[in-house]
Amino acid sequence: MFLQIHTLTSFAAALLNRDDAGLAKRIPFGNAERMRVSSQCLKKHWRDELHRVLDLPGGIRSRMFFEREVFRRAIMTGVDEAVAQKMTEALLKKLVQGGQDKSNPLRLNQPILFGKPEADYFVSLIAECAKSGEDPVATLDARLKAENGNLRALMKAAGQDDLVSGIEGAMFGRFVTSDILARTDAAVHVAHAFTVHPLSTEVDFFTVVDDLKEAHEDAGAAHAGDMELGAGLFYGYAVVDVPLLVSNLCGCEAKDWASQSAETLTDARNVLARLIDAIATVSPGAKLGSTAPYARAACILLESGNGQPRTLANAYLKALKLSGDPMQQAVDALGEHLAAIDAMYGCKEKRFVSSTQNASKLAGIPAAPLTASIGAALDSIFGAD
């Protein structure tokens, strides 16, 4: 069961996502170069919004996770500082093999995502082993070797199996090379957004006035600079593997997702509803203070079904030469491409549309308010409330 989310969003003069040279990211596609917003940029802003609106355990992505989240909290539970140092160092070595910073034994050499439930478990494990009356490091090592050294199994045995890697890990995954540290496959797959028309940017030259400069002093600005700005109409695409999302949320097998408790399925439904809303309303953006790049999607197509997902990006393989009403032109192009796909493969999805434009060419269904479209799409997956 997949949920596909297609969006069309227009941004005025902005610098949504910069490359290493400070220029707008771009990508060649079809017959033209396009402005681009990376999936990492999009997911970062969506995660921040989901943290704000969801009452579910979050995650911590940091090189200093063991140093500042585990070690410090272990001391606060009453573990001797020297003992806590040795045990946290041993825990890091065991969990993230080869991932230790050589200059700081409590620090990782690269950021790794850990869930707050994992942090809670590590702190409680160190506290228990420290109070065991035996060699605490040896006791910790023995505990970690239990359940065949699988962290998720250990946490399950301790009653902490839900959202082990946090809501971020459940949605966007966690890649690790350690055998004991649980890898989480991404349930939400996000494409890079790109403009449906050719790249169009200009360099904005700006100056800074010195407020304390007096009239008789040298004329001129205190500082001069430039930055690239662009405006564009972006196609965005994301896919949610619903069984995998439920599995990541509660620890069940993905094949058993539909038989989980009402509470678990309600959590999954809430996560998806908030995710769709974030995709529609949360803007990425560098240079927030000087461009205010806040926009909402003008067209959203939701699709649910069991078939292999497929992007509709090829609706814009030939870059649009915008004229008249650009947004209406983009919506019509999306509808025409979708009709061509259906003519070749048949329609295997249920579809739901919200749009500020005339969406008659898009899936042949009337547009509805976004909340209604989200509710109907989720009903098609989970059943009506």
Image: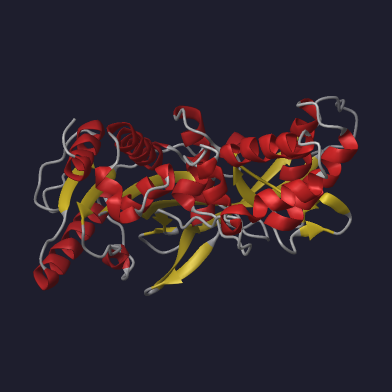
Q: Residue at x 27, y 33 (%)?
A: 262
In front: 253, or 132? Answer: 132
Q: Is residue 113 above or below residue 339?
A: above
Q: Is residue 98 above or below residue 276?
A: below
Q: Position of residue 23 (x, y in %)?
A: 61, 58
Q: Is residue 337 above or below residue 215?
A: below
In front: 260, or 206? Answer: 260
In front: 123, or 4? Answer: 123
Q: Position of residue 100 (x, y in %)?
A: 78, 58
Q: Is residue 328 visible?
A: no
- The reply, left or right, for residue 214 in relation to residue 147 is right
- The reply, left or right, for residue 217 in relation to residue 277 is right
Question: Which quadrant of the structure image shows residue 275?
Answer: top left
Query: Quadrant where the N terminus lies?
Result: bottom left
Q: Position of residue 72 (x, y in %)?
A: 79, 33
Q: Residue at x 52, y 38 (%)?
A: 160
Question: Which quadrant of the structure image shows residue 329?
Answer: bottom left
